[in-house]
Image (cartoon, helix red, strand yellow):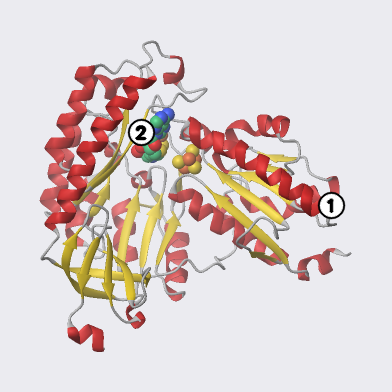
Amino acid sequence: MTATDDKKCPKRLHVITWGCQMNVYDSGRMADVLAPLGFAPTATPDDADMVILNTCHIRDKAAEKVFSELGRLRVVKQAREAAGRSTILAVAGCVAQAEGAEIVARAPYVDIVLGPQTYHRLPEMVARAARAGGGVIETDFPAEAKFDYLPDSATTQGVTAFLTIQEGCDKFCSFCVVPYTRGAEASRPAAAVIAEARHLVAQGTREITLLGQNVNAWHGEAPGGGTWSFGRLIRALAELPGLLRLRYTTSHPRDMDDDLIDAHRDVPQLMPFLHLPVQSGSDRMLAAMNRRHTVDDYLRLVERLRTARPDLALSSDFIVGHPGESDADFEATLHLVRRVGFAQAFSFQYSSRPGTPAAGAPLQVAEPLKHERLQGLLALLREQQAAFNARSRGLVMPVLFTGPGRRPGQLSGRSPFLQPVHVNGPISLIGQVAPVTIVDGRPNSLAGTLTLEQICA
Ligand code: SAH
Ligand code: SF4
Ligand code: F3S
């Protein structure tokens, strides 16, 4: 078969994604890169000519899942081989970057191992794997910028979409693998971001979440030369006709500058919900974590943000049981949570990651104690989330409808504060924002009603 025939031949691609929103975005982009080779998505690995595992290395359990999934896929690959069909098995993402050699050693039936910075080279890797029968490893940080080599997105993301604008991290928190798996901070040029946003809107996207490991560290090349701040980029994106809503994640408290805070005051498209991880409420722990901010810095930042946008709802990430964390440090975290009041938050037991400074630190906290602290924090955060949702009852909120709900006649949407909202209504409302009267605020979602006018429209 010639290379040209090969391109025309329809093939199936199955992608399994773990980890953060950036991995979700990357999985879409990998599918875009492979589409010109004839690969179309399929929902199961059994009929896939290529399977990509897009992996996450952030916690021990996340990384372990990869090897158990590989064991299952080995069986699928063997069964297909027995039926005369080949399968290219690729491991991408942060586990591939951190443990490329180990993957090859433990799972030699894997054909391609590629880090997050090399997926623009996938077509060439697929060709090499086909020629050599596997054994392709690409985990370097190439000099060329990946984004310059990616085609326009062919996969439609839908009413809400992710757009990566920044990648990598220079912060080196004591516990975290991201600076090692994603490399140094890099920002995409503003013109490229705006072009991709315009493309998404043309495909029907109405809400874009800008992504970056430190998204608010973005400072990119301006369209006319020079550099734009992140706040300036948000203002430019807000001018795109048809783009109704903007969000961004994940931010570091250190990179929250005046310009960005002002954007929360001035740009109505910027939704009043911010994920701003603090990790701990103890200054001692924040110093041990190398977070480079104090509790007071965080509280003052929250105050400035709430002054700029009084209805701003906050979310955060917390780690319990970092080496050296005492009962008093943990109590300080609970105290901070009570002072701020979060609309939602994620909390994790500290997980020792090889190669990070905290992994070798003395005074590791025992697992049962970490577990106990996590349960305490989770209970408080759940209570706050439930109270936040309950307070929504009776309010009229603009809801962006994203798709049909689970029950017939039902629609799913998002409130400005990222709460899932369910109403009965016509599917013609999908992709639109309409006012909804919230009738019930449940712990994880809201129920509402449309006015008769909207139902009949
Ligand atoms: N860039 C973001 C977070 C990226 S990782 C930030 O700076 O906040 C997402 C979250 O995973 C982190 O906020 C942290 O709470 C958690 N996390 C990271 N490393 C971890 C580890 N070793 N153990 C437990 N949780 C961890
Ligand atoms: Fe990890 Fe810290 Fe960087 Fe966030 S800021 S990605 S937690 S090193
Ligand atoms: Fe996981 Fe890598 Fe994202 S470690 S959280 S997939 S940056």
Q: Ligand 2: give its quadrant.
A: top left
Q: Within the image, what quadrant is residue 223 found in?
A: bottom left
Can you say whether 309 is above or below 237 in the image? above
Percent x, y of residue 256: 26, 43
Would residue 375 appear left or right of 160 to someone viewing this image? left
Percent x, y of residue 45: 66, 55
Would residue 37 appear left or right of 249 to someone viewing this image? right
**Closest to the observer, 175 or 410:** 410
**Closest to the observer, 415 or 385:** 385
Give the quarter of the figure containing the N terminus: bottom right
Closer mark to the observer between disc 2 and disc 1: 1
- For marks 2 and 1, the one nearer the N-term is 1
Q: Residues within 10 Å of mark 2 (few under 14, many from 20)?
A: some
Query: Does the closest atom of ligand 3 sit within 8 Å of the Cβ of label 1?
Result: no
Give the quarter of the figure containing the C terminus: bottom left
Which residue is denoted by mark 2 in the rendering? 348
Question: In the rendered structure, which amino acid carries the disc numbered 2?
Answer: Phe
Q: Residue at x 18, y 44 (%)?
A: 384
Can you say whether 13 is above or below 125 in the image? below
Which residue is denoted by mark 1 in the rendering? 82
Q: Residue at x 85, y 57 (%)?
A: 84
Q: Is residue 245 visible?
A: yes
Can you say whether 159 is above or below 100 in the image? below
Q: Secondary structure at mark 1?
A: helix
Counting every numbered tag in the picture gives 2
Query: Does the closest atom of ligand 1 sit within 8 Å of the Cβ of label 2?
Result: yes
Q: Residue at x 18, y 85 (%)?
A: 452
Q: CA distance from mark 2 to mark 1?
A: 43 Å
Q: Is residue 311 visible?
A: no
Q: Within the image, what quadrant is residue 14 found in?
A: bottom right
Q: Secondary structure at mark 2?
A: strand
**Closest to the observer, 65 or 407:** 407
